[in-house]
Image (cartoon, helix red, strand yellow):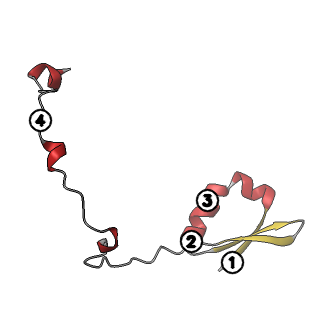
C-alpha cells in the first residue's frame, strides 16, 4: 500500500509517517504534486554467526601477569575504596 503526502503536511506528521513506514507501508513525499522521495523501512542487518577462531588474525595475546602484580607503590586500603 502506498500513500502520497506533500512535504508541508509531512513536516507536522513526521513521527506518524515514520511509524507507518516502519510497519511496512510505503510513504511517498511529493513537492508541487510530483513525487520527490519515498519513506520505506530499513531492512534489519543480516545476523552473522560468530565463528570460532575469528580473532586468530590478531596473534598471541600479551602476558598480563606483570600488570596484575602489586609492586608496593600502591597498596589499596579501605579508605581508597570508600572515597
Disc 1 versus disc 2: nearer the observer: 2
Q: Residue at x 26, y 76 (%)?
A: 53
**SS class, disc 4:** loop
Identify the residue at image location x=13%, y=19%: 79
Helix, strand or loop at label 1? It is strand
Q: Say which residue label 2 marks.
A: 42
Q: Quadrant of residue 74?
A: top left
Residue that mark 4 sits on: 70
Q: Position of residue 28 (x, y in %)?
A: 74, 71
Quarter of the figure with residue 54: bottom left
Q: Position of residue 49 (x, y in %)?
A: 33, 79
- Whether 47 is drawn above or below 14: the answer is below
Residue named by callout 1: 2
Q: Nearer the viewer, residue 47 or 31?
A: 47
32 relative to 55 in the view: left or right = right
Q: CA distance from mark 4 to mark 2?
A: 52 Å
Labels 2 & 3 near each other (Cβ < 8 A): no
Secondary structure beneath label 3:
helix
- The disc placed on residue 81 is none
- Residue 31 figure quarter: bottom right
Choose the circle earlier in sequence order: 1 or 2: 1
How crowded pointer 4 is (Cα within 10 Å; few <14, some 14-19, many 20+) is rated as: few
> CA gap, disc 2 to disc 3?
16 Å
Tell me the residue that label 3 is attached to: 16
Camera-nearest label, 1 or 4: 4
Of badges 2 and 3, nearer the viewer stands 2
> Which residue is nearer to you in this view: 75 or 51?
75
In what element is the residue under mark 2? loop
- Work out whether residue 72 or residue 42 is closer to the camera in this orientation and state it: 72
Q: Which of disc 2 and disc 4 is earlier in sequence?
A: 2
Measured in 3D between alpha carbons, the distance from the residue under mark 3 to the one under mark 1, in whole angstroms, is 15 Å
Looking at the image, residue 29 sits to the left or right of residue 25; the answer is right
Amino acid at each position: 500500500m502506498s500513500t502520497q503526502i506533500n512535504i508541508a503536511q509531512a513536516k507536522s506528521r513526521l513521527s506518524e509517517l515514520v511509524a507507518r513506514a516502519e510497519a511496512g507501508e510505503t510513504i511517498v513525499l511529493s513537492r508541487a504534486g510530483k513525487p520527490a522521495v519515498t519513506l520505506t523501512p530499513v531492512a534489519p542487518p543480516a545476523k552473522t554467526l560468530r565463528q570460532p577462531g575469528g580473532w586468530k588474525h590478531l596473534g598471541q595475546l600479551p602476558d598480563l601477569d606483570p600488570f596484575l602484580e602489586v609492586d608496593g607503590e600502591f597498596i589499596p586500603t579501605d579508605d581508597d575504596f570508600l572515597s
